[in-house]
Image (cartoon, rainbow, N blue to C red):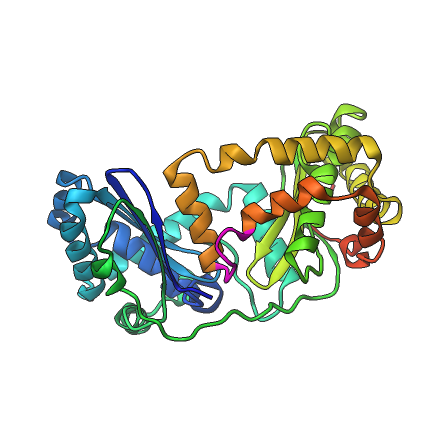
Amino acid sequence: MNNFVHLKTNDDLVYISISYPNYGRIFHNANAMAAEFFYNESLDDEFYIKLEQSAINISASANYFDFTFDIVCLKKELDNCLNAFNNMLLNTEITNFELIKNKIKNYFLIHIQDYDNLAKMKLYENYFKNDFKNDKFGDFEALDEKEFKNYILNLKNQANKIVISANLDDISKVKKLLNNKQSSYEKLKINESFYKEESKEISQAFVRFISSVEIKSIYERAIISLAIYVLGGGFGSRITEEIRVKRGLAYSAFAFLVAFKKNYLISGYLQTKNESKKEAIKIVQEEFKRLVEFGISEDEFKKAKDFLVGSEILKYSTTQNRHSIASSECFSDLKQGELREITKIIKDLELKTCNDFLKNQKSITELSFYVIGNNE
């Protein structure tokens, strides 16, 4: 796959995204988390002031698989922007390590009160093997200054991928940032399906659920995308109708396809009263089984196609959106334009083809649940 993508625009703004594969939270959790705080908040104040004065924005993020920088600047400030980014990567002077640790700890303590996010974290940690750590809740207490310094020292030497969206004839300066080493993603191994509960003295139950689906082609991804929209894509979807509209068990209940590099997941959530959680969970299980066994109705099929095809234009309505989609494709080893191709396939899909495919996707029904609520 191409590790450098240039999207030609008519804008005066330049968008650059630089991703370092396999340098994110799954394999470098505490260090990746610390690096995000280090680059975003912990460099010299004068450095950030100069960026702001030139309307340059450089933000770092420790994602699941990758460590990523997103850069936005005016075309006339590109040289200053690239110099600033290079200086950022070369800066390995850590003068406030304890502050970084405390920021991560405070972030952790605040966000464990978000029970929906906590349920999601625990679901992922239990679903994936190899001590998968979710979101920014990692092993901050194990953060070591020497290991962290090695992490940021080695960052500039890692394989990377770059997407630039700009009105530029010469992109050689940006291309100099590319370190075109080979990198690849491995499929994450998963545990057997489970149901786990964690008791908290709260009035609501926060339910997160997940299953896997085998997708071997863009055509199969198009079918699953449509099917999951029917299942849990919002108002009018099966889960929302059965749980919220018909029974009033929850304000919202959703299911959606998650593309996790080499893993495709169907994930979802709902929030309900503690006394109604079992009923809501049973409905989710039944709707997943019904989708596989009986497929999609003609009316559902038509409405889903109309919505997914009709809303496609909005996804590409701005340069920033187009840049974000191109980055997603590049950083996931997809061909450029592949996500748009999914919509074209959906437009021409036939109902029988979809339902025949779904009948063979038994893994969809092998749901795992993590629930946080009051078990009394």
Question: Which residue is rendered at x = 80% and y = 26% of the image?
Answer: 247
Left or right: residue 128 versus residue 56 is right
Relative to 127, residue 77 above or below? above
Question: Which residue is rendered at x = 56% and y = 53% of the image?
Answer: 121
Quarter of the image for residue 172 reads bottom left
Quarter of the image for residue 153 reads bottom left
Quarter of the image for residue 308 reads top right
Quadrant of the frame with the C terminus: top right
Q: Is residue 335 magenta?
A: yes
Q: Does the rendering let one see residue 208?
A: no
Instruction: Tell me which secondary structure the magenta stretch mostly adopts.
Output: loop
Q: Which residues are magenta?
A: 332-338
Left or right: residue 114 versus residue 296 is left
Q: Position of residue 46 (x, y in %)?
A: 11, 48
Left or right: residue 81 versus residue 347 is left
Relative to 275, residue 131 above or below? below
Relative to 255, residue 130 above or below? below
Which one is nearer the viewer's eye here, 27 or 290?
A: 290
